[in-house]
Amino acid sequence: MTETTHVTSCPLNCWDVCGLKVTVNEGKVVRVDGDEHHPITKGNICGRGRMLKERVNAKERLLYPLKKVNGQFVRISWEEALDDIAGKMRKLKEQFGPTAVLHSHDYANNGLLKNLDRRFFNCYGGATELIGSLCWGAGIEAQTWDFGNAYSHAPEDIDNSRHIVIWGRNVARTNMHLFERLLAAKKRGATIVVIDPLFGPTARIADQYVCIKPGMDAFLAMGIMKELLRLGLEDRAFIKQHTIGFDDVKQLLQTISLAEIERHTGVSRDQMTKLARLYGDRPTATYLGLGMQRYANGGNTIRWIDALVAASGNVGIPGGGANFGNLQVGECFDKAALTLPERKTASRTWTMMKQGEEILRADDPPIGMVIVTCGNPLAQVPNTNLMKKAFASIETVVVFEQFMTDTAAMADYVLPVAASFEEEDVYCSSMYHAYLNYGPKLVDPPGEAKPDLWIWTELAKRLGFGDDFAYTREQFLAMALRPLEHHGITLKRLKTEHRVLLPVEPVPWRDRRFQTPSGKYEFTSTIAKKKGMDGRLQIMYPAESEESNPALAAKYPYRLLTIHPLRSNHSQHYPLIPALQTVRIEVAADVAAAKGLADGDRARVYNDRGSLVGTVKVLDGAYPGTINIDEGQWGVFGGPVNVLTSDLESDNGCGSALYDCLVNIEKVTSEAK
Ligand SMILES: Nc1nc2c(c(=O)[nH]1)N[C@H]1C(S)=C(S)[C@@H](COP(=O)(O)OP(=O)(O)OC[C@H]3O[C@@H](n4cnc5c(=O)[nH]c(N)nc54)[C@H](O)[C@@H]3O)O[C@H]1N2
Ligand SMILES: Nc1nc2c(c(=O)[nH]1)N[C@H]1C(S)=C(S)[C@@H](COP(=O)(O)OP(=O)(O)OC[C@H]3O[C@@H](n4cnc5c(=O)[nH]c(N)nc54)[C@H](O)[C@@H]3O)O[C@H]1N2
Ligand code: SF4
Ligand SMILES: [Mo]
């Protein structure tokens, strides 16, 4: 048979949503390359995308439905698996109502049809659902309070920026096509600033690197704002005509001195003055990452950075923006047509962060079953030891998976699902660019693995709402794309052109019409006030810090970051890359000196929640007292790092505090076998 090459999309949860070219031979994926015709990603892809070939072909793929009997998995038929699960769901609903079933999920796959999970649970009558986000929840809510929504500028708009501030985004590692644009911007003379506690490859290309104490970015924004006002560089016309609450900001700024801010952030007054001049010399673009909002004060931090961008007149102008997420992309589709929210009759919601605690506490009704899709919560949700206890307490754990992850290993039923290139879908993300990529089905799933949608359909039939799933994938896609028809965007066009640009505003808020209740940019938030909160910007510290909890800081003096791995998308690539299968503990130079640690030493990192052993690597240029362990490691390889992290929610209730974590570290001289 001859090879054929097809244009498709990377489905992984990532800023970039690259266009791919996938070569197939004899029903197998034999090569994954970049699609040079994709307008944003232009043929360049990362190793994680390239390794989708190894992932789909891996010998470790799950091939058959499994049921745990006396602690061991045994192969069962799909009939038996589906009948058992549907039977238990029916019983739970009769006895307790539909919220006795928990749907635990994340966003492992950017396919639009992955939203059909919600259709299933809505038609079932509801379920206990998870709200908020481990990933970016604090920042999205913060921007919703400030602007009324979270919108970013189009990638090309960076060409209009005089200065570019990369604030807590690990661009070289997580957002490679923004990194390419940064290199080009630097070449044409734009200034690049990187604000991050860790000195990495993005900082290496910066004109100014600001090494900040973790969790203290709001203070830096305050310091820059104080200098901006002292130098008279604020945009008075914008503040006057298009904002509310600036007097509250000025008042609060008077209560804190630059000396205090220097002490809190580790950033010098000179650097703040320089940054104030740069923000005043418009247009300055700010690219916020997710780093500094994964703290108990994360929402307030993003709001202070937004406030700085707004006060300096960098909102709604080409080359500016407080670029965080781009929810315009997701708003293009008719998600209600896919998910049928009106079918829900009962509802209970918990935040993503608190699922462990809530499972253990729930009694009205208790959780009788959890169904896990597109996620690996026992590695990725904070406080793993609590999560394990919670999952162990549930009578029936069902996991739809491709691999035997830490979560699947705990399941009572594991249902094998299709992976990349094994099902038709369309792909986009509300993170960076606004292209929608078409992804045809290129190969069959191995063994008896099935698409998630097939499983929902079979369960729906058994539970009496099969009619709601009696549509083809194309029909479902057409439902979701309907609002785009009057822009000339149809599935047919997508199939021929491979990708289309969604109708989004490239320079959000250009018309100065904000989606807040007042229609203005809100330094003091009406939405927050309506929720019973103060609404003004605050002075706030991370929860695990010398300032908030000195006793804890005395016991656990080091700050633990757990950033995203370079070579893996969260936990997904670890089983494929032997070099990744150890825990690497990166420590700032002062930590190494204090604890007598050198590269290659074994060490144990611990706090009251858990402990982890790994191999030390000393970091250059990291903020003193900082330790990093990349997230995503599997239990069998010594992970996950979330045994150490806290399940606290962010200040605005919607995000995680994954990086708000104090630990101690000790050298390990002999390891128990
Ligand atoms: N290689 C790779 N790429 C990915 C992913 C992956 O798993 N692997 N995941 C994708 C997903 S789902 C997401 S959400 C994105 C995340 O994309 P990023 O936001 O770039 O990723 P993070 O790893 O969260 O890293 C954030 C950065 O914030 C810094 N940071 C931590 N705390 C602070 C702080 O208090 N202040 C400041 N200023 N900086 C801080 C960290 O040092 C790090 O450089 O990446 C996407 N891309
Ligand atoms: N400590 C720490 N923890 C973190 C983070 C951090 O920075 N530090 N980052 C957080 C962030 S930003 C995110 S987005 C989350 C990510 O959390 P998760 O999404 O839970 O992480 P993944 O490892 O990508 O796990 C996804 C699982 O879904 C499976 N999967 C892939 N495609 C499909 C599919 O089509 N159907 C089904 N049923 N399953 C599929 C994969 O095999 C994989 O096991 O992790 C969060 N956790
Ligand atoms: S993981 Fe991200 S950067 Fe890598 S190929 Fe996929 S979309 Fe592109
Ligand atoms: Mo994420």
Image (tube, grey):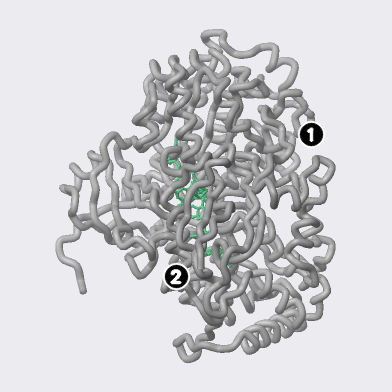
| Amino acid marked by disc 2 | Asp
Which residue is found at the position 51% from the left and 26% from the top? Answer: 221
Give me the residue at 71% from left, 43% from top. Answer: 532
Of marks 2 and 1, the one in the foreground:
2
Q: Quick one: 133 or 478, which is closer to the camera?
A: 478
User: In the drawing, what numbered circle is on residue 49?
Assistant: none
Disc 1 marks a residue whose amino acid type is Pro
- State which quarter of the image contains the C terminus: bottom left
Residue 95 at x, y percent in the picture: 74, 83
- Where does the image place residue 232, in percent across and percent down from the top left? 56, 8
Which residue reaches farthest bottom? 70
Asked if 59 appears above or below 206 in the picture, the reply is below
Query: Label 2 belongs to which residue?
Result: 406
Q: What is the C-alpha distance between the residues marked 2 and 1? A: 44 Å
The residue nearer to you, when weighing 377 against 228, is 377
> What is the number of the mark on residue 517?
1
Query: Taking 284 as reference, is 595 left or right?
Result: left
